[in-house]
Structure formats: structure tokens, C-alpha cells
Amino acid sequence: MIRLDVKKRLHGAKGDFVLKVELEVKEGDFLVVFGPSGSGKTTLLRMIAGLEKPDEGYIEVKGKVWFDFQKGINLPPQKRDVGFVFQDYALFPNMSVFENIAFGMKRRDKDKIMELLRMAGMEHLANRNPTSLSGGQKQRVALLRALAREPSILLLDEPLSALDHQTAQVLREEIKNFHKNYGITVIMVSHDKEDAFKLANRVVYLLEGKVLAEGTPKEVLFSRRSSPKFSLNAILLEKTYTDVVCVLTLAIGSELVQVVVDKDTAEELSVGDTVLVSAKAFVPVVRKIHSPHLKT
Ligand SMILES: Nc1ncnc2c1ncn2[C@@H]1O[C@H](COP(=O)(O)OP(=O)(O)OP(=O)(O)O)[C@@H](O)[C@H]1O
């Protein structure tokens, strides 16, 4: 069980705000902390890992106090039993894949490293230098390095966000399997609803430092507050006015779409804005374009 209640004043893009989170995470949970950029997600993970100090509060993991402001307890990162995977891999470029995974293991165990590499289909890359690997392979090594420590908690900070859509899909499945096989407690930060939906058994929705909603992925992601019947976040790339309407070109994930809006709506939007595209009632046409399930 992880129990935390932390507070920290942050300098946000639009001014100062207080990150205030009270949470309990059960053993074996896969918690996704979901929310827009700048809401304090990474800072929360860094506070758990000991890389950032809360202004107030406490953090307790498996009955052991890692931080207690009142009692003046603040364990250094190396004494906290966490595996941390960063968005940008953070591998040691001068060490082989094998050495990267061995680094930080409580007891260097060659068989265990090779078993992890085998599980990820990367045995043949053991002696390679990380600089010669693809983004997906680097992130796999970072994940194996974190798992090799057999930590009490695995902290994942947007581990898929630097990868292309297809590689991210494959790695998302692997993370899911690692969690299933090892039963490890995972806290993952993401602004991607797909991560939250596919991986989490619990989701916390963080906005400007506050927990706005908490529950199962369905409860949080499909709540009326966060989504009507159908809604997608998009970036506005271009506005093209005709006589009576305006055509907006939008990027939704890696897809481009065009939607028509009236001129008044268009006037309120600027290129580069993040917008919500939603429809309360619609009859969609759904067609399969790809299946991950092999036919036998
Ligand atoms: N130690 C700190 N002291 C004060 N402000 C900070 C500190 N660390 C981060 N911030 C600010 O707090 C805000 C939230 O940052 P954080 O990285 O935690 O958000 P996030 O939700 O993870 O965003 P993103 O998805 O973009 O990474 C940012 O504006 C950042 O500049």
C-alpha cells in the first residue's frame, strides 16, 4: 500500500498554483495519473522518487515512511525502492544494453538480466550500445532496467510519448504484460486517454495540481465532466474561410481531419489552439483497418 498526502507550490505557465494530492494506491494497482500538460503530473512522480521535495505532507510505501515533513524525514532517491522510466529513456550511452540493465540492480544477476532480455525479445542486443537502438528498443531497455531492480513501485513518466503510434501500441501491450506477469505496483503519468483506458485499473485526473476525478478508467474518462458522447482533443492547424462558413484543419493524434464551423466560432480560435471536437448525437461508420490478432 502506498499512502501519500503532499503539497507543493509550483510556478505554472499562467502563474503559481499549488499541487495538492492525497492518494492511496493498493499493492498491484496500475494507476494512471492523467491530465493536461502543466498540471503537475511529473512533479508528483518526482516527489515519490525523492527527486523533488514536497513543501508539506508525507509519503509512506509498504509501511515505511519515505517522507514526513513534520518529523523531518526525507529519504534520498537511492534509498527509495522505485524503478523510474523517463520519457527520454535516460540510458547510459557508454554502457552496453546488458550493463545498463545491470546498473542499479540490488544484486547483479546475469540469469535474471538475460531472462528479462529474452522476455522482451532483445537477447541478441545485449552487447549493443544504446545509441545504436531505435526509440522503441531504447524505451524497452529503460523499462527492463527499472524492472531489474525489483522495485516496490514502478514509476513511468510518459514512457510512450516520444514513440510513433505503432511502436507505442506494441510497447503499451508489453507494459501491460509486464504488469500482469510481475504483479508490480505501477504509477504512470500520461496525457493520453488510450494509455489510461488500456493500462489502468484506476485513473486519477489531475488539473492544475488538484485531483478533479478518481475511479476506474470508464468512470473517469467517460464522465460527463470530461467528455460528452463523443469528444476528441485536437490542435488547430489552419482556418480557411468561405463565404458563409470556415473549414478548420485539425490534427487529432497522428490523423488530420477537416470540420466545418460557423464564422463566429472560427473567430474565437487561433491556429495552434488545442480544441475539443465533440458531438452529442451522431451515427458513426466504424470500419476495421487493422487487427493485432493473428488469424490461424
Ligand atoms: N520544483 C519546481 N518548483 C516550481 N515549479 C515547478 C517545479 N517543477 C516544476 N514546476 C512547474 O510546475 C508546472 C507543472 O509541471 P509538471 O512537469 O509537473 O507538469 P506535467 O503535468 O507533468 O506537464 P507535462 O505533461 O507537460 O510534463 C510547470 O509549469 C513547471 O514549470
Image (cartoon, helix red, strand yellow):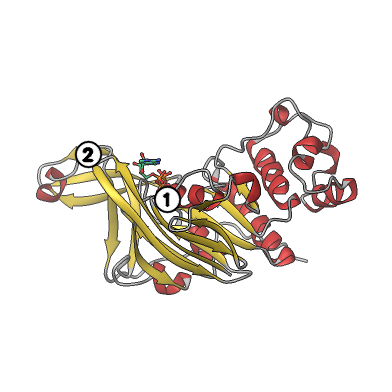
Residue 102 lies left or right of residue 268; in this view the side is right
Question: What residue lies at 22% left-to-right and 51% top-to-bottom?
Answer: 260
Name the residue tied to disc 2.
Answer: 239
From the viewer's perspective, is residue 12 above or below residue 151? above
Cβ of mark 1 under 8 Å from ligand 1: the answer is no
Question: What residue lies at 66% left-to-right and 60% top-to-bottom?
Answer: 152
Most distant residue in the top direction: 94
Q: Which mark is residue 254?
A: none
Q: Earlier in the sequence, mark 2 or mark 1?
A: 1
Residue 230 position by quadrant: bottom left
Q: Amino acid at mark 1?
A: Pro
Distance between the alpha carbons at the discs numbered 2 and 1: 44 Å
Tell me where residue 191 appears, x and y as whole percent.
43, 52
Question: What residue lies at 49% left-to-right and 59% top-to-bottom?
Answer: 194
Residue 91 position by quadrant: top right
Ligand 1: which quarter? top left
Question: What residue lies at 47% left-to-right and 60% top-to-bottom?
Answer: 58
Name the residue tied to disc 1.
Answer: 54
Cβ of mark 2 under 8 Å from ligand 1: the answer is no
From the image, which quarter does the C terminus lie in?
bottom right
Q: Nearer the viewer, residue 55 or 193?
A: 55
Name the mark nearer the viewer: 2 or 1. Answer: 1
From the viewer's perspective, is residue 159 above or below residue 230? above
Q: Nearer the viewer, residue 45 or 69?
A: 69
